[in-house]
Image: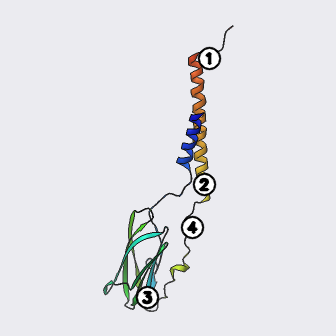
């Protein structure tokens, strides 16, 4: 019986649908990746799937590296403010962030500033997926845990039957 309880606890620990710490993943940005936006631009926002604890972001354009006037981390959104960007051309954004799992993640993208293009949408208008556990994760965890328990029970029954047979207790009498 102790083995059964131990096996059930092990199955519950291994296959419990707890959130897994994963690296931060880029979700969206404003201006968007490969976006075409009109000047002036004074804010860059990048959205990640996890809360960002540290961020280093650089933006360079036709006139070189831009110096932000302000940098803000708010949950999963990192924002940089600049003096208004008026110069047309391609701008490159490079980022390196650390989320709650402490693994650094780096990436980058470009956007283009062009007269007459629409202004970028703010990141607050970008739908951010929920980081909670999905129903599919719960079902998968329950099925896997149930499978472990079922296999453990079957193994215990076979082991008990094998012991009975080898000890003579399970051999039918001929008399």
Label 3 vs 2, first from the N-terminus: 3
Residue extending furthest toward the left: 64
On the image, which quarter does residue 53 sit in?
bottom left
Residue highlighted by disc 1:
169
The spot of residue 33 in percent (x, y) is 44, 76
Residue highlighted by disc 2:
138
- Judged from the image, the secondary structure of the residue bearing numbered disc 2 is helix
| Mark 3 or 1, closer to the camera | 1
Q: Residue at x 58, y 31 (%)?
A: 156
Q: Residue at x 41, y 63 (%)?
A: 102
| Mark 2 or 1, closer to the camera | 1
**Residues packed near mark 3 inside 10 Å, few (<14), some (14 to 19) or many (20 plus):** some
- Judged from the image, the secondary structure of the residue bearing numbered disc 3 is strand
Q: Residue at x 59, y 15 (%)?
A: 168
Spatial separation of the CA atoms under disc 2 and disc 4:
15 Å
**Quarter of the figure that contains the N terminus:** top right
Label 3 vs 1, first from the N-terminus: 3
Residue highlighted by disc 3:
41
Label 4 vs 1, first from the N-terminus: 4
Residue highlighted by disc 4:
130
Q: Residue at x 61, y 44 (%)?
A: 146
Label 3 vs 4, first from the N-terminus: 3
Spatial separation of the CA atoms under disc 3 and disc 2:
43 Å
Q: Who is closer to the viewer here, 87 or 46?
A: 46
């Amino acid at each position: 019986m102790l083995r059964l309880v131990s096996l059930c606890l092990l199955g519950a620990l291994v296959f419990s649908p707890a959130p897994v710490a994963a690296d931060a993943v880029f979700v969206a940005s404003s201006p968007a990746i490969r976006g075409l936006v009109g000047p002036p631009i004074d804010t860059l926002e990048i959205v990640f799937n996890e809360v960002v604890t540290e961020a280093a972001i650089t933006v360079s354009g036709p006139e070189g590296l831009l110096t932000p006037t302000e940098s803000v981390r708010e949950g999963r959104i990192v924002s940089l403010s600049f003096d208004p960007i008026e110069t047309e051309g391609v701008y490159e954004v490079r980022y390196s962030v650390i989320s709650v799992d402490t693994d650094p993640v780096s990436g980058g993208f470009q956007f283009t500033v062009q007269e007459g293009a629409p202004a970028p949408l703010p990141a607050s208008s970008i739908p951010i997926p929920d980081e909670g556990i999905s129903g599919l994760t719960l079902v998968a965890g329950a099925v896997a845990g149930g499978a472990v328990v079922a296999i453990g029970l079957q193994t215990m029954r076979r082991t008990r039957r094998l012991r009975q047979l080898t000890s003579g207790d399970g051999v039918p009498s001929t008399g």
